[in-house]
Amino acid sequence: MSTTATQALSVPAAIEARHSIRKYKDQPVPAADLREILRLTSLAPSSANIQPWRFVVVENKALQAQLQAAAFNQAQVGSAPALIVVYADHEDVVATADEVIHPGVPPEGRERSRGMIAGFFAGKTLEQAHAITASQSGIAVGFLVLAAQSLGYSTSVMLGFDPAKVRELLDLPAHVNLPALIALGVADEPGFGTHRHPVDRLARFVS
């Protein structure tokens, strides 16, 4: 349970409460809350359960200042109590495929699953591999911001940054993809109210 909320929000309540926040209170996020947010995030679905997402949680202000410069000087990168760098590693997915195959799968099924996972990326260019992992990791990003909101924390998801510079600053391998940077903390502003298309503008129902 979050130290900032007496009761976790339901999924609908977290969805309706969430706004992009760029100003945060100077208040650390307890390690237990960060771990719980990431645990909930890890429950996101992915094709063949490949779980390509990985996270670097940055709470070092000197490093955040460098990352802010790499993110076109977006202030929340440096000022948020925690910055979560989301990256995806397709090479690690293939190398550790056994770890994501359910233990109840029999040996012949495990072999098929390993082949399917390797086949996702076999013969693909780096750009194609990144497209696969980005689409999967986007689901995890959605889980992360709602998990944070449910525990009383606000977020700002950023796609504008120099991936090569972020990889360099965090000593990440050159092949990994970087779907997003996420600022996280207790909000110090209300943020803009939600303004979205109505359902009838977005959906067509066929029966």
Image: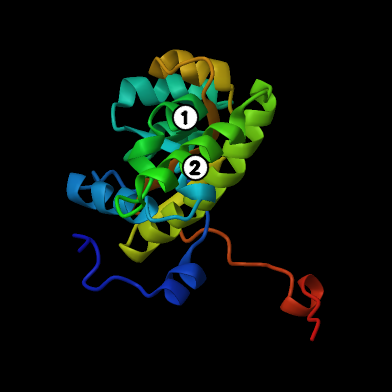
Distance from disc 1 to disc 2, alpha carbons, whole Å, reads 13 Å
- In contact (CB < 8 Å): disc 1 and disc 2: no
Q: Secondary structure at mark 2?
A: helix
Residue 121 in which image quadrant: top right
The residue indicated by pointer 1 is 94
Residue 120 in which image quadrant: top right
Q: Secondary structure at mark 1?
A: helix
Quadrant of the image for the N terminus? bottom left
Q: Residue at x 41, y 35 (%)?
A: 97
Nearest to viewer (mark 1 / mark 2): 2
Q: Position of residue 104 (x, y in %)?
A: 31, 55
Q: Residues within 10 Å of mark 2 (few under 14, many from 20)?
A: few
Q: Residue at x 61, y 67 (%)?
A: 194
Residue 154 in which image quadrant: bottom left
**71 w.r.t. 86: above or below:** above
30 vs 143, nearest the viewer:
143
The residue indicated by pointer 2 is 112
